[in-house]
């Protein structure tokens, strides 16, 4: 996959945003995306200043 299946962004106000980036398949979860999300949640867990995590989706669909 040439683009990232999910993108993690940390803001200065303690909010981490994970954006699902598979709009061509309505952001449906597959094995790769699940693994990527698990890694991102571990990364977020190691950040002292994070108070909240928002999971969003690129495109018009969000599927779990």
Image (tube, rainbow, N blue to C red):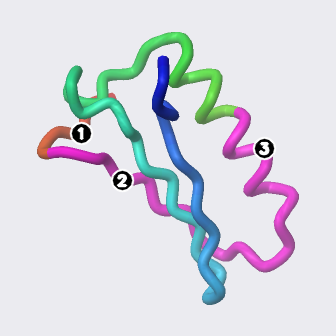
Distance from the alpha carbon under mark 3 to that under mark 2: 18 Å
Identify the residue under disc 3.
42
The residue shown at (51%, 34%) is 4
The residue shown at (56%, 62%) is 53
- Figure check: 9 above or below 18: below
- Picture coordinates of residue 29, whole percent (x, y): 39, 21
- Picture coordinates of residue 36, whole percent (x, y): 62, 29
Disc with the residue nearer the chain's start (3 vs 2): 3
- Figure check: 55 above or below 26: below
Q: Is residue 27 left or right of residue 2?
A: left
Furthest residue in direction front, as rendered = 2
Q: Which residues are magenta?
A: 39-59
Q: Is residue 23 left or right of residue 41?
A: left
Is residue 63 inside the magenta stretch? no
Identify the residue under disc 2.
56
- Picture coordinates of residue 38, whole percent (x, y): 67, 32
The residue shown at (64%, 22%) is 35
Furthest residue in direction top, as rendered = 31
Identify the residue under disc 1.
62
The residue shown at (53%, 11%) is 31
Query: Which label belongs to residue 22?
Result: none
Front-lying residue, 33 or 53 = 33
Disc with the residue nearer the chain's start (1 vs 2): 2
Residues at badges 1 and 2 in contact (C-beta under 8 Å)? yes
Which image quarter: residue 48? Answer: bottom right
Describe the element under mark 1 as helix, strand or loop: loop
Front-lying residue, 24 or 16 = 24
Describe the element under mark 3 as helix, strand or loop: helix
Distance from the alpha carbon under mark 1 to that under mark 2: 8 Å
């Amino acid at each position: 996959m040439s683009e990232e299946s999910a993108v993690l962004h940390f803001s200065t106000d303690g909010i981490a945003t994970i954006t699902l980036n598979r709009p061509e398949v309505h952001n449906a979860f597959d094995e790769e995306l699940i693994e990527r999300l698990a890694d991102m949640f571990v990364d977020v867990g190691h950040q002292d200043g994070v108070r909240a995590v928002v999971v969003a989706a690129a495109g018009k669909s969000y599927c779990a």
